Image (spheres, rainbow, N blue to C red):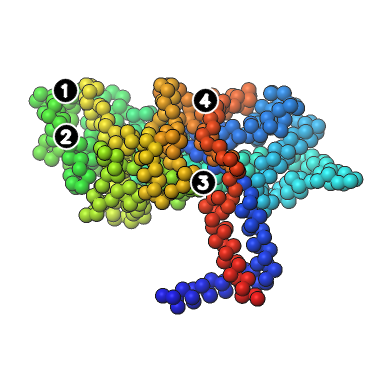
Amino acid sequence: MGRFMELKDKKYMKLLAEKFPSKQAVCREIINLNAILNLPKGTEHFMSDLHGEYEAFYHILNNCSGVVREKVHLLFGGILTDFEQQEICTLIYYPREKLAMLRKKDVLTGDWYRMVLNQLIEIAKLLSSKYTRSKVRKAMPEDFSYIIDELLHVQKDEDDNQVLYHSKIIDTILDIENADEFIVALAGLIKQLAVDHLHIVGDIFDRGPYADKILDLLQGYHSLDIEWGNHDILWMGAASGSLACIANVIRNNLKYQNTEILESGYGISLRSLALFAMKEYTCENPMEAALKAVSVILFKLEGSIIRRHSEYGMDDRTFLHKINLETGEVSINGVNYKINDMEFPTIDTCNPYDLSDEESAVMEELKAAFLNSVRLQSHIKFLYEKGSMYRIYNGNLLYHGCIPMDDEGNFEGVQMEDEMYKGKSYLDYADKMARRAYYSTHSTDAKDFMWYLWAGRKSPLCGRNLKTFERTFINDKSAWKEETDPYYKYYKEERTCNMILREFGLYSNMSHIINGHTPVKTIEGEQPIRANGKLMVIDGGFCKNYHETTGIAGYTLIYNSHGLRLKAHQPFESVYHALSQNKDIQSESQLVETEKSRILVRDTDNGKNIINYIEDLKQLLNYYD
């Protein structure tokens, strides 16, 4: 083994020497990397539970959660009026649209262009100051990188030659009528420099109508990761071919009247389902009939999965065989409840969990549509490439749902495939199975597990006992209560959060848990910061349906070189109002944790990698002696 490692090290050093062929080249790189280590860390933004609210998310992505407005005020607060500052901000957020609007008002004079270009350059200078010149250059649009680089690094000299040079560049841009494209380029650079890395802590899909447009945006974003949410995993399961996940996706979107994402967004037609439903059920509205039909199909498919997997421990969640058609009741945990709808023409009382031939045909057609939707498959592959069940990033632990626990607050052991998993090992197992479901076409157990991750009693993404059947067919709301995992009782305690962090190898006092999934009811006095600051729940209710519940319209957690702060966003009117009236999302900032000294690159994950690389380069120096 020692001999093997020695040969491996020599081979590595040989490859390193090809990259740095001289002692001076090695020294230059060590000096450069050491300089990078002492720069402030880049700014991270954390968001969760976007739930298809495209316009609000698009605006927050453009205003960088209010950071752009803060920088504009910092530079021009004592020079420009509030209106003038708002005009600059809107131009940065939506440069093409704002320019088109201003052109109609005949505002775009040469003097206006000169003023605005200089203002944008000053903002870009401020934001670029914490990065290396090389990194800033890489962030620039290729067509303008040389010019922007020159303008950002103009220095006053004795004869003002540099300032004149700067002025001549801008004059040339105006003379050749390229100012609009240059403004667009500068606006993009400013937004990229304002947020170095974006974390989406789950639930891009469902409720709101445009998750597909959000994913289009994210696919073009410069640096991000995604921690899967329960709604994401449901769509991932559907795109993998799980019939139970497909039925759930369709039911959710029929219930929330979001069928546009299926039919227009992903080209998945519901026509066959609607025709079948209108034939079998007496509902006059085709979509109501389709909802009823797919609900019955869903409960059949779920019952079949539960019966195939005794390890799920969910036998009490099968109901179709418990329906008494004579009394119109269903027995649940020894209690008989009246059913609000007794029309079940496709249920065979001898085999209640078998799909009828027509139900099977409808589901097979829908499965083919999900598997063959090019746009959906592109988005799901992106979720797999950028996503995971959890992530450890710069000392923080990110996950969407929960770490399942028992009633005493210990990690719950979950038995799967004759193995017992708990804590980190369980989330690792779930991540492995989620990937197997998509990339191994014949893995039925993995596809079933995708449904379990959506609705399972001990799912780390669900975290509660879903009562879909009861909420559909029983009017008595006492049957609707969804018991939550004990995690949600214990995660408010610092001791519990420290136990979770240690389970994932995080022992620093600076580490935190970033959690989504459960909307914070600020209107009722709930706080997003819990366990003495060790855990932050950042689901502030992006979805419009949650605004009355939460009292706000989403959170962004910001982690920069000075520490952590939480931004609570108010509802967003529309892009039209943002353009025509400079209406921005109003956000309140709350300091979570301020560092005594600035956090540097050397304190980050990337910094640790650089330090290791420097050590390798120092070893390489020995080969040149």
**Of the residues tagged 1 and 4, which is closer to the observer?**
4
**Of the residues tagged 1 and 3, which is closer to the observer?**
3
- At 64% from the left edge and 57% from the top edge, which residue is drawn? 34
Question: What element does badge 4 sit on?
Answer: loop
| Residue that label 2 marks | 320
| Residue that label 3 marks | 224
Q: What quarter of the picture does the N terminus occupy?
A: bottom left
Q: Residue 570: which numbered mark, if any?
A: 4
Q: Are marks 1 and 4 in contact (CB under 8 Å)?
A: no
Question: What element does badge 3 sit on?
Answer: strand
Specify the quadrant of the image occupied by residue 68. top right
Q: CA distance from mark 1 to mark 3?
A: 49 Å
- At 40% from the left edge and 46% from the top edge, which residue is drawn? 501
Q: Residues within 10 Å of mark 4 (few under 14, many from 20)?
A: many
Q: What quarter of the picture does the C terminus occupy?
A: bottom right
Q: CA distance from mark 4 to mark 2?
A: 44 Å
Q: Earlier in the sequence, mark 1 or mark 3?
A: 3
Q: Residues within 10 Å of mark 3 (few under 14, many from 20)?
A: some
Q: Amino acid at mark 4?
A: Gln
Q: Earlier in the sequence, mark 3 or mark 2?
A: 3
Q: Residue 58: where, in percent of width, then height?
A: 54, 35
Q: Earlier in the sequence, mark 1 or mark 4?
A: 1
Q: Earlier in the sequence, mark 4 or mark 2?
A: 2
Between 115 and 32, the residue placed more toward the observer is 32
Q: Residue 425: where, in percent of width, then height?
A: 33, 52
Question: What element does badge 2 sit on?
Answer: helix
